[in-house]
Amino acid sequence: MSALSQQNNKRIAKNTLLLYFRMLFSMGIGLFTSRIVLESLGIEDYGIYNLVGGIVTIFAFLNSAMIATSQRFISYELGKGNLHKLKDVFCTTLTIHIAIAFIIVVLSEVIGVWFLNTKLNIPSDRMMAANWTLQLSIFVFAVNVISVPYNASIVAHEKMSAFAYISIFEVSLKLAIAYLLLFISYDKLIVYSILVFCVALLLRSLYCFYCKRHFEECHYTFSFNIEQFREMFAFAGWSLVGNLGFSFKDQLSNILLNLFFGTVVNAARGISVQVGSLINSFSANFMMAMNPQITKSYAVGDLYRSKELVYAGCRFSFYLLAVISLPIMINITYILNSWLVEVPQYTDIFLILTIVCNLLYAISSPLTTAMQATGRIKWFQVIICIVMLTELPIAYLLLSIGYPPYSVLYASLFVTLLGVLIRIVLISRILPIYEIRYYVTHIFSKNILIVFITYCIAYILHKKMEQDSFFTAVLSSFILELILFSLAYLCGLSSTERYVVNQKLVTILESKRRKNKQKNI
């Protein structure tokens, strides 16, 4: 392994640790905040907030396409070391995002307001609060859209400490908001929406200030390089198609649930999505640290290192997610009853199925990064969009013939699994260095089997215990983690990855031994 590769691996490890510190703090405070917000708003208003916010998020496909584009082009030019081109990319990207924010506001004001007031199943006495929530959600989303190029610059420069510190500040503010709701007598849904908007505005200002101070290319001047725009638009245009599938399938499924069952089911779905997102950050943080290296390695022509990073990302992101997901799945009833004052019906099943979908996605998401690094994403995005959108007719069919609310996630499981297979087939067509047989046998099948065996053993042991309790949850989780770590290390990792893990452990142990010697002296 070259000195440069070792240095880059250390940077990935350092950035991953910073992001994990951020994630652990955010997850702990975030779960506690959700409990207070649900208690303060009530199940119905909590469901309304998630439902109405989802209307705006339907148009997120416009922005999601540019998020991937911004990160890819900024990371690519950093890998090339071209500062002039990097400035052009940033300024052009920010100009595009300002235009996207304007388009989303207009679409939301026209289509969103009409849909909210004429189609959704919301009690008449809560329509005014729902409209306030929609308006403030629109402006929160617009602010977040404009800040994307700044966030992409932080990721590309691999300055993850900025995310860690600002995220700690963010969750602290949201916790303060949750407590404030307990002492407010005015309409709490409206007040909560206003305060969330204020926090979003403050956080985006902080990210902007940080980037301007640390990155030379982030000083914006109006620029619209037509050649740069064409190159980025060709990439973003096809990314938009793929993200349209993801955005529509998630938010329209939520609307389907509202039309069939009402806002209480939306509350259960909202809790499962929020917890699922927090859990998913275990693997997402790792990939956030690794993605720039995948793109930069491809940019300088080191395809072998790029491939090894992708394969390692598939394994480690999956196992990192499984580490936190499996104990929650085993102890789901105890955790929800201990966490929430009132648990909406179906929350447990929604959450378990959401976690399984996240696990399947985690095992293939690095392949998407590899595809984006090449810039050849046309057919990939078209096919993924079609596959993702098939979830909606399947979900509608299941609900219309009488299946329970959580059956919409059966459709999600099917399309997620199909998406995994499509990603490896398409990347192997573009870059033959990626082998379908190797991925299916040594990564996908092996990892799924290890997690399935671990879950089955832990589930049987948990059922033999007398009752759900803190002791039962801790004991079953400890046994589960012991089995998972053993199987993952012995059977799941490649020989190279085991060597890297061993070297890292040796380094940590030697560092501790030296510190102990210095203390004794």
Image: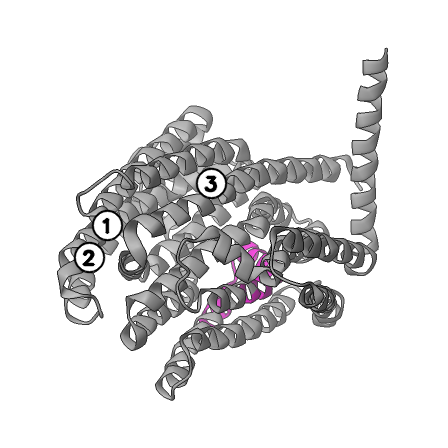
Q: Judge whether 249 appears above or below 320 on screen.
A: below
Please tell me whether mark 1 sits on a helix, a strand or a loop.
Answer: helix
Question: Considering depth in this image, is 110 or 297 the residue closer to the camera?
Answer: 110
* Image quarter of the C terminus: top right
Q: Which residues fall within the magenta stretch?
A: 356-382
Q: Judge whether 382 appears above or below 205 on screen.
A: below
Q: Which mark is in front, 1 or 2?
A: 1
For the point 19% across and 42% down, which residue is it? Answer: 185
Q: Mark 2 to mark 3: distance in Å? A: 26 Å
**Is residue 346 visible from the viewing direction of this image?**
yes
For the point 76% across and 66% down, which residue is it? Answer: 442
* Image quarter of the N terminus: top right
Q: Which mark is in front, 2 or 3?
A: 3
Answer whether residue 381 is magenta in the image. yes
| Image side of residue 476 versus residue 264, left or right | right
Q: Mark 1 to mark 3: distance in Å? A: 21 Å
Counting from the top left corner in percent of width and height, residue 248 is at 36, 68
Question: Considering depth in this image, is 400 or 44 the residue closer to the camera?
Answer: 44
Q: What residue sits right under mark 3 in the picture?
A: 29
Instruction: Give the residue type that dot 1 points to.
Output: Leu
Q: What residue sits right under mark 2 in the picture?
A: 130
Q: Earlier in the sequence, mark 2 or mark 3?
A: 3
